[in-house]
Amino acid sequence: MSASPKYTHARLDPERERLLRLERQRQAELEREARRAAEERRRRERLEKLRSALVEQARAFERQIRTILDGELGKFAGDAGIRMKEEATKLVAESQGVPDEDALRGTNRRLRSLERDVDNLRDSTRRAHREEVRGQLGTLRTSFGELDRWRSRKFDTSGFAELEEVLRAVEHTFEARTPDVERAKFALAQARDGLEAHRRRVTAAYDCWAESKQQAEARFHVAADRVVGVLSDPVVQRWQSKNIAALTKDLDVAERLLKQEQFDVAKARAAAIEKGVDQLIVAAQASQLNEERRQQIVAAMRETLVALGFVVDREILDDPHDEGSAYILSGTRMTGEPITVSVPHDSEVRYWLPGHSITAETDQAGRVIRSTCPEAETLIEQVHHTLQSAFGVETDGIHWPGKPDDIDTQRAQIMTRTASTRTLEAGGK
């Protein structure tokens, strides 16, 4: 018989295909719920950590306001200080019960707003206190000392250095044996203006930085949740393990970008990871559907070969390391007649039947233009009949290179030819 394999296109009958797809949909829904459960667990854990940090931050603001109200500047705070204290206490209670991350981010923004209000409260109380002339320098020193050094140096490096220079000039003015009051007032006003301008620049830059950081972290955590979800999905793990490993590495890269404060790049990388997870799920589901269909066809083929007198003595994947490779069944009849069948995931079922004679027709140049293999055709037709009648596996006939109905078009184009017929032994063509 020809060394080239015979092949066909196998499929389930419509009812079995429908049932197969319904079962895959049901399984996919269960798998989707498992992924969602894994994602939800991680979200709850993260929310609890963020909530704890938020509560501590809210309490810290509450303590700051109480320190102001209970200190020497408290008398200048008035009703604004009392309202701010009540707001801080309210935010402490709210932060303990934030239901989700959106609410948590909203509370976080209110806390940042409260932080600015605390700064404004300090400023307003100190403006009143600055009327006590000698207390003005101490107030300025305190205000400067309360600056967040990390934020100041990160978001307004030159402004912070200039502010230090101005403060030294103010101190020098007050250190004189007989301070020039007008000069002192001018120096203090310059220092206060510089301090307020510095705070505004730092606050604006920090708010922008914090918002970008928060958005990037939120997108990163969503991507991480999705990766955790597919790591818990056995179907995705089965068919997409290498791609999952690649996404995990991408997640590490996104985390490094976050630490390097490349927030836009990190957010884009996280979005790409989410898209990649969706693609993996679609591909894995398609592979699983192909595998489940293939399992039914293999089982039907095994029973068919046995029914036709073959002893199936070998079943193996074409590539043991690739579950998506073709499934090979080999069998032999009592007469010694062998057969090998290859059932792939999503292409032709192929047959090898060595030992059968092929009749070939050649042209004047000796080229084979038509070949037939009656014995092999008869056997494969029996296989196809049994597959369909007993197991609902439909085929589209038998095909091989040189089969008459596959070369009619080519033959019509040959204008002149002298044909002869000869018989080729097994393996020749």
Image: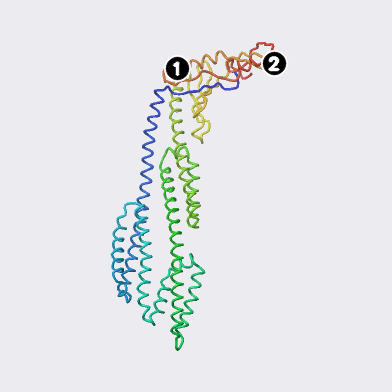
Residue at the far front in the pictured view:
182
- Identified by mark 2, the residue type is Gly
Locate residue 108, reporting x and y percent: 37, 58
Q: Nearer the viewer, mark 2 or mark 1?
A: 2
- Identified by mark 1, the residue type is Thr
Picture layout, residue 70 above or below residue 41: below
Picture layout, residue 391 above or below residue 83: above
Q: Residue at x 45, y 41 (%)?
A: 278
Q: Nearer the viewer, residue 63 or 346?
A: 63
Colour setting: rainbow
Residue at the far bottom in the pictured view:
177
What crowding class fits label 2: few (fewer than 14 Cα within 10 Å), some (14-19), or many (20 or more)? few
Residue 386 image label? 1
Locate residue 25, reporting x and y percent: 38, 33
User: Which secondary structure, mark 2?
Assistant: loop
Q: Quadrant of residue 20?
A: top left
